[in-house]
Image (spheres, rainbow, N blue to C red):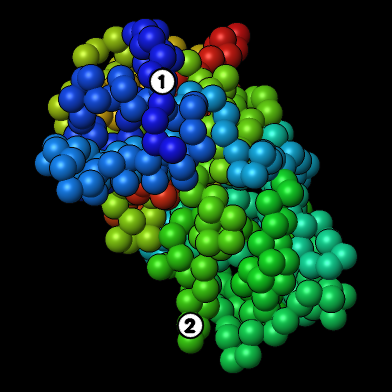
Amino acid sequence: MCEVSMPTIEKKYIDRHLPLPRVPTSSRQFYRFPFIQLYSILPLVHLFPKASLFTCISTFSLHPRAPAKMKHFSTLFAGVLASLTLIDGHPTSLNGKQYSVQQVQNPHFKRDGIRALAKIYRKYGVTLPESLSSSTQSGKTRRAANASGSAITVPVDNDAEWLTPVQIGSPPKTFQMDFDTGSSDLWVYGPKAAALGGGQTEYVAADSSTSKELSGASFQIQYGDSSAAAGHVVQDQVSIGGLAVSAQAVEVADEVTQSFVDQSNLDGLVGLAFSSINTVQPQQQTTFFDSATAEHGTTLFTADLQQDAPGTYNFGFVDEKAFTGNMTFTAIDSSNGFWEFSSSGFAVGSDALSQTPITGIADTGTTLLLLPADVNEAYYSQVEGAQLDESAGGFIFPCDSELPDFSFGVEDAAITIPGSFMNFTSLQTTSAVVVSRRRKSTGATSAKGSGGIVASAASAMCFGGLQSSEGVGINIFGDIALKSAFVVFDGGNSQIGFAKKALPAASA
């Protein structure tokens, strides 16, 4: 039946709910309903199963004598009903389950600003500038990446890299994977690649009863510095925190360049961008997230990265206890395959938010925050001793400098990155080498502009978490930004949501 006794409606009922989802075609518009209609409909959510409630509203709207406004309203209501996971302010899950995985640390990873920046160039297929390329030759290439999923995250060397256990095959075998919202391939090391001596866990199709060769399929990932991975493709069961996909495309690397061999504790990658940029040929394959959406209706996942503490990723539900205040959504543009959105502006310190839109992507696989040069200049002009140094790879500053907060806008809200987060790492031995080289060529203990690091060899210089996006050609909201908020990747509604959360006090 469609009859219901409407309970007394109190304003506090609405106050505890999240804002309504955004209309995907307009990043500044909410779904809007007459006030009384909204107050009347939301209580129905808790009185009927969603399917029954939708049938009830739809049946009434199609009645010959139904008001025209009601017919129109039923269409809008369908959009609200499809988004109840976000509207209802409580953790909701698929079939009563919540999918989570606990991340582990890569004990061999060390923060390095130059290599972190070089990794971004490689990832997005951009040739490294000569100064950056030469600076990366002094040691092994390390992957500075982050992860996402339904997981507890353990920080590694101030959380520059996160690895997450993923089970593949039957019986399941565990691989420590990098979760990456900036790519769309799920790949692991096959026996041939693992035999090169990197120490990675190898995937052997014959060991899994659920493995099936994807005939004729292959993949090749080529980066801007000529590093690459290539191989064949199988379908197998993949499980992340109990969320299992029965026939996920798993790309098995047969050939890798030395830079991949050097990533000894990284067993592979789980891409969580959109399937349109998957590299499998001749037919692209779906990402784990898209496969889970098709198989289980998992239309969103959340990222709750932390500073120097475990973080969490959830699939299929939003945990209201993980953030404070309201969740603010803005539309994404997935036409390029990324979680691309438009930030409404930025602010340094206590300044008011500018009205300068910044279009960029949310990328858990990138450690740094890369924004336009003028944004960098606005920020580092407020940092004593800061300067742009080509040999160091970007902006550096004395490690004892006080760093202001940095905020970026999401619609009419602002997410603030504490100044303490903006110090990525000390330059350590790298800075000493660069300073020595500059001294030899200039005979000075300090230099500015196009010169070397402004410091004596004994000075402690640090590499900024904010760097310029000019060389890469795309603005990237990496982990420096993402760990400052609770983030909802809502593929079902083509939107991304940000909310404030409790952040740790600045370290001494």
Q: Amino acid at mark 1?
A: Ser
Tell which of 159 and 140 is nearer to you: 159
Image position of 43 (left or right of 254): left
Image position of 392 (left or right of 312): left
Tell which of 92 and 413 is nearer to you: 92
Badge 2 density bin: few <14, some 14–19, many ≥20, Cα 10 Å: few
Q: Circle 1 sits in a helix, a strand or a loop, which is it?
A: loop
Residue at the disc numbered 1: 5
Callout in the foreground (2, 1): 1
The x and y percentages for residue 25 are: 21, 47
The x and y percentages for residue 328 are: 34, 28
Q: Residue at x 64, y 44 (%)?
A: 95
Q: Residue at x 71, y 62 (%)?
A: 238
Q: Quadrant of residue 442?
A: top left
Sequence-wise, which precedes: disc 2 or disc 1? Answer: 1
Q: Residue at x 21, y 14 (%)?
A: 352
- 7 to 395, vertically: above or below: above
Farthest bottom residue in view: 216
Quarter that holds the C terminus: top right
Q: Residue at x 17, y 32 (%)?
A: 356
Image position of 266 (left or right of 118): right
The x and y percentages for residue 293 are: 53, 56
Residue 283 numbered mark, or none: 2
